[in-house]
Image (cartoon, helix red, strand yellow):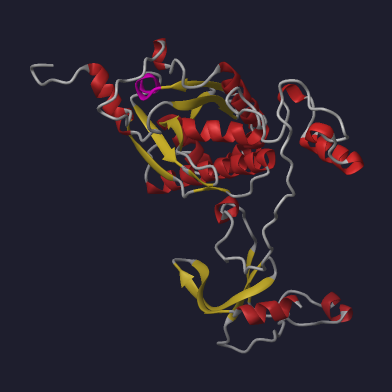
Amino acid sequence: MSDGALSQDEIDSLLAGLDGGSAPAAAAPGGRASSALSPQDAQAFKTILDSITGAQSQNLSMITGLPVTVQNPAVDAVTRDGFLRDVPEEVVAVTVPFGGSIPGDHVFVMSKELAARIAALANKDEGLTELDDMAMSAVQECVSTLAGTEITVIAEKTGNRNIQSSVAEGKFGPKAMARVPTGDFVRASFQVQIGDAVPERLTELFALSFVRDLLAATGGGAQGGSPQGAFPGGMMSQTGMLGMQGQGGYGMGGYPGGGMAPTGMNPPNVQPVQFASLQMQQASPESGNIGLIMDVYMEMTVELGRTRKAIKEILGMGEGTIIELDKLAGEPVDILVNHKLIAKGEVVVIDENFGVRVTEIVSPMERMGDMG
C-alpha cells in the first residue's frame, strides 16, 4: 500500500469494529462468517428461538389487535457487509442490549413498511404512514415486549434470573447508519404476517459472544462443553454421583460406591455446595419491566356524586325527577381507575365536551386504607 490507500478488506475490518492491525477473518459467500458459529451451535440456538415464536405471535397480536403469525426463524452467522446486502436501503433499527450475567449487543431490524404498520395498529391510526416520534415510540414499546419475552424464556432455560435488557432505542434511516453488533454476529430472520397482509421480514441480531455464552449456560451446542463435574458421553450425572456417595462413600481410587474410576478418567472432585447467605432486601419501586404493561387499558371514571334510594323511590322516578347527591356545589369530583379512587378534580368544558382538571392526587396511605 505504497499509495496510502485502504483496501476494501481493510475498510470492511474497520466497519466491523475489528483491530486495524489484524488480518480480517475470511468470510464465506453471501457474507456468512466461515467459522463464527458451528452448525450444531446454530441449530441449538434456533431451537431456543423456535420455542419463543408462539409467545411472540401472541404479543404482536395483543399490540396490533389482529391475528399475527411469527414463523420459526432461519439462523446464521453473518458479517456486517453480508447483512447490509440483504436489507432494504432504509430500515428501522431498534437496539435493546442485553445486560446482567449474559451481556451482549441485541438489535431488531425491520422495513419502514412493517414498522409503520405496527405503529398504525398500536395507535389505532390506519392513516399513519410516516415514522414520527409517536410512531417510533410505539415500535420501541413493541420491541421491548418481544425482548422481555425472550429474557423470560432464556431465564427459564438457564436458571439464571440475572439477565436484563436495556431501554429500547430506535432509529429510522439509511441501512449503512444502522447500529449492528460489532464483528461477526448471529442473525435470526422471522417471517411475520399481520392479519391478511403480505408477510414481512423481521430480523434479530445477536452478538456472537452472547449466543456462545447462552449456549454454554444451557449446555447446548458444540462449543458449550460438558458441565463441570459431569462425565463425557453422559455416563453419569452429578446427581447420580452424589447419590452413590451417600450410599457407600468413596472407596478405592476415590470413586463413589467403593469402585474404581473408569479407565482414562480422573476421580471426580465433588465438594459441598456453598450457598450465599440470604438477606432481606427492599425491592426497588423501579424494578421489573414496566414497559410490558404500558399498553394495557384501564377504565377511568369521573364520579359527580352518589346517593342511596329505596326501591320504592327508584320505581317512582320519571322524567323531571331531581336526584340529590351527596356532593355540595363546587366540591371536587372523584376520579376512579377500575373503581378505585386515585384523584379529585373540577369539571371543565373543552370545546363542547366535558372534561375534568386534576386538582388533587389521593395519597398512597388513603389508597391503602380504601383497599383494607
The residue lying toward the viewer, choosing from 105 and 220, is 220
- Residue at image location 17% in from the left, 21% down from the top: 6
In the picture as drawn, the residue positioned furthest to the top comes out as: 29
Q: Quick check: 88 above or below 245?
A: above
Residue 27 magenta-drawn?
no
- Residue at image location 77% in from the left, 75% down from the top: 318
Q: To which quarter of the image does residue 268 belong? A: top right
**Where residue 195 sits: x, y (%)?**
60, 29
In the picture as drawn, the residue positioned furthest to the right comes out as: 247
**Where residue 28 sits: x, y (%)?**
41, 12
Q: Quick check: 39 above or below 322?
A: above
Q: Quadrant of the C terminus?
A: bottom right
Q: To which quarter of the image does residue 225 belong? A: top right
The reply to whether residue 66 is in sight is no
The residue lying toward the viewer, choosing from 195 and 275, is 275
- Characterize the magenta stretch by its predominant secondary structure: helix
Range shown magenta: 79-84
Q: How many marks?
A: 0
In the picture as drawn, the residue positioned furthest to the left comes out as: 3
- Taking 149 as reference, is 87 left or right? left
**Where residue 108 sits: x, y (%)?**
47, 35
- Taking 104 as reference, is 292 left or right? right
The residue lying toward the viewer, choosing from 22 and 111, is 22
- Taking 160 as reference, is 181 left or right? left
Q: Quick check: 5 above or below 58?
A: above
**Where residue 168 sits: x, y (%)?**
46, 46
Q: Quick check: 300 above or below 204?
A: below
The reply to whether residue 245 is in sight is yes
- Residue at image location 70% in from the left, 53% down from the top: 274
Q: Quadrant of the N terminus?
A: top left
